[in-house]
Amino acid sequence: MNLFLLFLKTLLLATIFTVSQSANCNNTDHLLISKAFTSVSNFNSSWFNCSHPPISEINLSSRNLSGTLSWKFLKNLTHIHTINLSNNSIKGYIPTWFWSIPGLIQVNLSKNKLGGTIGFESGSGLSSIQVLNLSFNRFTNLAHLSNFSNLSLLDISHNNLKVLPFGLDSLKKLQHLDLSSCNISGDSKPISNLTSLEYLDVSDNHMSGTFPNDFPSLSTINFLNISFNNFTGYFPYDKVQRFGNSSFINAGMLFKVSNFSSLNRTSHHTPNKSHINPHNTTHSNPKNPKSMKKNRKPSSRKRLILIMIISLASLLVLLAMVVSICCIFRKRKMAKRNKWAISKPVHQHQPFKIEKSGPFAFETESGSSWVVDVREPSSAAVVMFEKPLMSFTFKDLMAATSQFGKESLLAEGRCGPVYRAVLPGEIHVAVKVLENARGMSHDDAVCMFEDLSKLKHPNLLPISGYCIAGKEKLVLYEFMANGDLHRWLQELPTGKTDVEDWSTDTWEYPVDSSSPEKMEWRTRHNIAVGIARGLAYLHHAQSVPLVHGHLVSSNILLSDYLDPRIAGIGLSRDRVETQTTDSDVYSFGAVLIELLTGETGSEETVVKTRKLVREGRGVDALDSRLRLGDNSVSEMVECLRVGYLCTAETPGKRPTMQQVLGMLKDIHPITAELS
Ligand SMILES: *[C@@H]1O[C@H](CO)[C@@H](O)[C@H](O)[C@H]1NC(C)=O
Ligand SMILES: *[C@@H]1O[C@H](CO)[C@@H](O)[C@H](O)[C@H]1NC(C)=O
Ligand SMILES: *[C@@H]1O[C@H](CO)[C@@H](O)[C@H](O)[C@H]1NC(C)=O
Ligand SMILES: *[C@@H]1O[C@H](CO)[C@@H](O)[C@H](O)[C@H]1NC(C)=O
Ligand SMILES: *[C@@H]1O[C@H](CO)[C@@H](O)[C@H](O)[C@H]1NC(C)=O
Ligand SMILES: *[C@@H]1O[C@H](CO)[C@@H](O)[C@H](O)[C@H]1NC(C)=O
Ligand SMILES: *[C@@H]1O[C@H](CO)[C@@H](O)[C@H](O)[C@H]1NC(C)=O
Ligand SMILES: *[C@@H]1O[C@H](CO)[C@@H](O)[C@H](O)[C@H]1NC(C)=O
Ligand SMILES: *[C@@H]1O[C@H](CO)[C@@H](O)[C@H](O)[C@H]1NC(C)=O
Ligand SMILES: *[C@@H]1O[C@H](CO)[C@@H](O)[C@H](O)[C@H]1NC(C)=O
Ligand SMILES: *[C@@H]1O[C@H](CO)[C@@H](O)[C@H](O)[C@H]1NC(C)=O
Ligand SMILES: *[C@@H]1O[C@H](CO)[C@@H](O)[C@H](O)[C@H]1NC(C)=O
């Protein structure tokens, strides 16, 4: 009987085994992988061996993969430890939870087109990643690494970080760090905490700080490169010789010291001043003493005395010079220190205590600050319009923005700072602090937000929710990955060398991809039509025309597909009262001119462009980065004419937004339909 059962069991197991081995591959991991790579071209699921179910490694480097990954499917690969997708053309953003996938050890996403931020908020676990290579991508300045405590190798070189990643100083196990060519400015001090470092490359940035004080102990470092930066300090020849001269080229104002121990960090002006030379010079001994010796010939005592006096005087002068150089130097160092202290996010000095009751001060980068003065700031509710079941509080907003820290700051808007936040449930929002609305009563503010939430149009930036914490009114918007129009226009490539790269990536657009030069123009035309649509909706689709009052290119955000979304509606009520729909039309004209000329839509640009259009020389005003195709030039010039009409000096002569929309659509009907 027992034997029979055993036989049945074996039979059953055998059947299961053969089934799982059948050609029809449907094991969970395989399905997840296929789903994750659905939108990646050149991917072939047969690369993964179906008969080895738990997929522990994804090694697809240099496979010419392009497109975006559906990251969420990787989450359920329970055995994954290595992901290598280097040297492909994968783009998009990496969701924050990705970094905390349990068991992930090695990640190499270098040489792709990935952007956005790196890292995740504190409180959402730790990353188990030990080797992380994100070099040669497009990551930007919000890197947040404090939860990557297991990292031993980090390469984020060749990205556009602008500042040192936040939390870098807590990576105690880090042995290999490459931050080269990341456009980083600011003090290098946090690096000095990395006591396990053996390899350090910070070359080709704009970093300041003192060398070697703001670095970890040089004795344990095997590779060092600080070239092309703005450091100050000393170049302890005996200690750094082994790194090679190329590691210090254009590193800043470094003074060469022949013997480091003779010149210690606290008392640099007393000993052996003569050994200090700007690093630039290759000789480490000054010439003056030698030349003095030459002049000293055995002659009359008078002459000797005279020479002695002269040399004494010159020595004094030399001494004074050295001392003053040292003074200047120290001052600079102090200034640097202070700068660091100020620009550091508030919570790094004093850990923010959430239990404490107000007032709470938040400082923004530009020095403006805002204060929440409430008893229980953490419990102030966040009202979400689309997701009424989600319950967030001000405390969640603080956690998601690192206590409204510098690293989450997206922009200093006209009405107040704007922060980026990822709320629980991966709700990605921009949080705007309405500094102008402090005087508004709670009920008025609720009314305003409720009214705004009712404005729904594809070309208006939807408000996702709001939070009223004491006097502070915070408004939440959907996060727009492509940023605002002003920035987008300014960040367009200037030289021709980059154009190819950009046209295949950022301007991915469902029209005529065979001719990128035309696509550029269509993209801009599509943006113009979209803005006109949104504004026409405000002016003409309401019971009472709604005036925007502050339409500028930085208030127009771009969706993933570069569709424009107008922001900042109804937030400047005081202004709006003095403004009319005609002034909105003027502002639209200025934005249109900016779109076509590539120059900021200031009054000056408007006047200049109007003059050119009047003289029939509109072509000369066009943005030189717009490649001129056959039809496109006349279309662009016609578009400029619309801008001309909109910016008419007499408000009554300006067309309505409905008319403007009609004119723009006529200029290029195909794009208008597609959008
Ligand atoms: C997997 O495929 C086999 C046949 O090849 C089928 O019997 C089984 O139901 C499939 N399982 C799932 C989960 O789809
Ligand atoms: C995937 O690879 C297999 C084997 O290498 C090949 O037979 C198949 O045609 C490939 N599929 C695609 C879509 O390229
Ligand atoms: C998958 O693994 C099995 C067993 O190890 C092996 O026989 C087969 O050749 C592998 N298939 C591929 C495509 O690598
Ligand atoms: C990963 O793939 C590349 C080529 O695609 C190969 O050269 C390399 O050896 C692979 N690495 C591992 C660990 O399998
Ligand atoms: C990167 O991939 C391309 C093909 O997509 C290949 O020609 C090149 O050799 C690869 N580079 C490296 C360093 O593997
Ligand atoms: C890479 O893939 C693209 C299509 O996605 C193709 O046009 C191109 O020729 C491929 N390049 C290589 C080196 O295989
Ligand atoms: C991952 O697994 C969880 C439960 O284990 C499930 O709820 C979720 O839907 C899965 N996600 C995907 C993308 O398959
Ligand atoms: C990823 O692949 C590249 C190229 O094959 C290789 O040089 C690198 O070591 C791999 N990295 C990891 C973490 O496997
Ligand atoms: C970095 O070092 C400084 C001084 O050595 C110390 O005060 C600070 O706590 C350290 N930071 C971390 C995150 O360990
Ligand atoms: C280097 O620092 C000095 C001040 O210490 C500053 O004037 C200069 O502009 C900086 N240079 C660069 C390239 O950042
Ligand atoms: C540094 O200077 C202090 C006092 O100026 C002295 O006590 C100390 O020995 C010096 N250290 C070295 C390494 O010369
Ligand atoms: C170093 O300084 C000398 C003058 O003392 C100057 O001629 C030379 O060009 C400088 N070299 C560099 C690399 O700046």
Image (tube, rainbow, N blue to C red):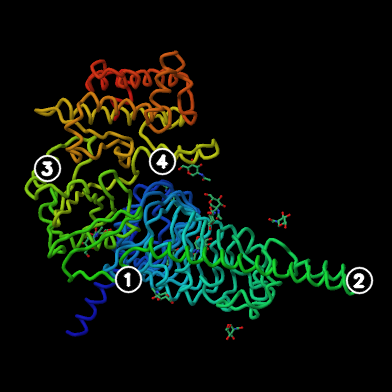
Count the marks: how many? 4
The residue identified by callout 4 is 506
In front of the other: 633 or 66 = 633
Q: In this view, does 445 lie to the left or right of 175?
A: left
- For disc 2, the marked residue is 297
Residue 600 vertical position relative to residue 144 in the rendered view, above or below: above
What's under tag 3, amino acid-wise?
A: Met
Viewer-nearest of discs 4 and 2: 2
First in sequence: mark 2 vs mark 1: 1
- The residue to which callout 1 is attached is 126
Precedes in sequence: disc 3 or disc 4: 3
Q: Which mark is residue 27?
A: none
Q: Distance between the residues labelled 4 and 2?
A: 75 Å
Q: Quadrant of the N terminus?
A: bottom left
Sequence order check, earlier mark of 3 and 2: 2
Give the distance between the C-alpha atoms of the residues marked 1 and 4, in whole angstroms. Answer: 33 Å
Mark positioned earlier in the residue sequence (3 or 1): 1
| Residue at the image position 44 percent from the left and 18 percent from the top | 612
- Residue at the outermost right position: 299
- Amino acid on which disc 4 is placed: Thr
Using the image, determine if residue 436 lies above or below residue 325: above
